Image (cartoon, helix red, strand yellow):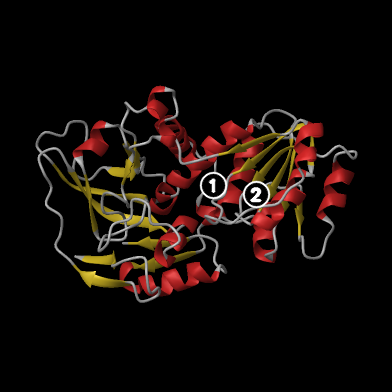
């Protein structure tokens, strides 16, 4: 079968190749999945360039946003059948570490994941191991959900975790920094959660237009417009209730804090470059009693709720997909993803 094999973190773009490898053998407790859609994300960019190495194995297959069709079911697997359309919650918590026992399985100290410890979605057939199935990480989808949307349930689940940490609710004003796929998901989730209005800050005009289409009240070009003035005009000089940083740009942190109202919350949702520091005025946090939170991965309940929202049509993930490629054209897909000009790039069957 064809697969994208990552040979190591060094020497990008020559550290991977599309090649033929052995089709996985389905064990008695496993599921063999025919990959129908596997999406590229910001984390993949960091993996291929070597900026992220934790859990990534040499000569392995990455890709953690996965949806497919069950090809084979091990004889000991119950509740699934050949032909089922399923999405995969890739993060598998251990269930017994201090983080899991305190209700933070998303931050599990010993978590395993498809696309890291186990081969991921950038291959024609993906082996879903017994531990993943027994953890409840395989979710059936109705025919009404496209495979591409099914793959995007994973980042949507991450956004739901971020939304919980941010605390967005009825009548809140929300500012989202960045209108990439993650920012656009946060936009839709904020509105579903009852936000009175959402302001989006984004450099790219096409992404700003899509943000408006998906419900943003204002889409600001921060290179041309005065974001602070617009935010303050919209909030009677108070600042917004909730802010989500959906892009990991360290230089924007200090200015972003200053746009939150007293008692407001800022979620540093995006992954930030490891080892790089941000300078900010701590008095803004002190005197304004700001709540600063992060967000990592998702809990299984977040994934199940994300899948339910997609299945019921409450959120539009297909609108976020901008490009689709076959696996043999993975290099074109990754180059486009790396260039930052695409919205969401999906590898499909």
Quarter the C terminus occupies: bottom left
From this viewpoint, is residue 77 visible? yes
The residue where tag 1 is placed is: 316
Q: Is residue 72 above or below residue 163?
A: below
Residue 229 placed where, x, y %?
87, 51
Name the side, left or right, on which 347 lies relative to 2.
Answer: right
Task: Work out whether 328 lies above or below 87.
Answer: below
Which residue extends farthest top? 102
Binning the other alpha carbons within 10 Å of mark 2 as few (below 14), some (14 to 19) or many (20 upward) gives some
| Residue at 12% in and 40% down | 74
Tell me the quarter of the picture where residue 94 sits. Answer: top left
Is disc 1 surrounded by few (<14), some (14 to 19) or many (20+) residues within 10 Å? some
Which label was assigned to residue 176? none
Q: What residue is drawn where x is 52% and y is 36%?
A: 161
Q: Position of residue 238 (x, y in %)?
A: 86, 37
Give yes or no for contact between labels 1 and 2 (Cβ–Cβ under 8 Å): yes
Residue sitting nearer the eye, 108 or 310: 108
The numbered mark at residue 214 is: 2
Q: Tag 2, which secondary structure?
A: loop
Residue ID at (14%, 63%): 22
Tell me how far mark 1 sits from mark 2, CA to CA.
9 Å
Task: Name the secondary structure under disc 1.
Answer: loop
């Amino acid at each position: 079968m064809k697969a994208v094999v990552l040979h190591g973190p060094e020497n990008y773009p020559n550290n991977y190749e599309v090649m033929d490898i052995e089709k996985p053998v389905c064990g008695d407790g496993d599921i063999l999945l025919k990959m129908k859609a596997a999406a590229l994300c910001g984390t993949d960019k960091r993996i291929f360039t070597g900026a992220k190495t934790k859990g990534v194995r040499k000569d392995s297959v990455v890709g953690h946003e996965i949806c497919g069709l069950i090809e084979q079911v091990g004889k000991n697997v119950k509740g699934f059948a050949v032909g089922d359309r399923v999405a995969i919650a890739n993060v598998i918590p251990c269930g017994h570490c201090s983080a899991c026992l305190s209700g933070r399985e998303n931050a599990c100290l010993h978590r395993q994941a498809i696309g890291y410890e186990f081969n991921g979605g950038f291959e024609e057939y993906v082996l879903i191991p017994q531990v993943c199935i027994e953890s409840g990480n395989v979710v059936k989808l109705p025919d009404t959900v496209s495979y591409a949307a099914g793959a995007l349930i994973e980042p949507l689940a991450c956004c739901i975790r971020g939304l919980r940490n941010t605390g967005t609710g009825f009548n809140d004003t929300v500012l989202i920094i960045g209108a990439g796929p993650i920012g656009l998901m946060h936009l839709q989730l904020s509105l579903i959660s009852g936000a009175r209005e959402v302001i989006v800050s984004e450099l790219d005009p096409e992404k700003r237009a899509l943000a408006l289409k998906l419900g943003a009240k204002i889409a600001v070009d921060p290179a041309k417009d005065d974001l602070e003035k617009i935010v303050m005009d919209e909030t009677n000089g108070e600042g917004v209730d909730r802010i989500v940083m959906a892009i990991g740009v360290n230089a924007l942190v200090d200015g972003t804090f200053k746009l939150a109202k007293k008692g407001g919350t800022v979620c540093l949702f995006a992954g930030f470059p490891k080892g790089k520091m941000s300078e900010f005025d701590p008095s803004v946090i002190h005197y304004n009693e700001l709540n600063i939170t992060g967000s990592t991965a998702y809990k299984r309940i977040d994934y199940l709720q994300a899948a339910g929202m997609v299945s019921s049509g409450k959120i539009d993930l297909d609108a976020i997909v901008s490009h689709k490629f076959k696996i043999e054209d993975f290099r074109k897909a990754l180059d486009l993803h790396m260039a930052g000009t695409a919205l969401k790039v999906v590898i499909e069957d």
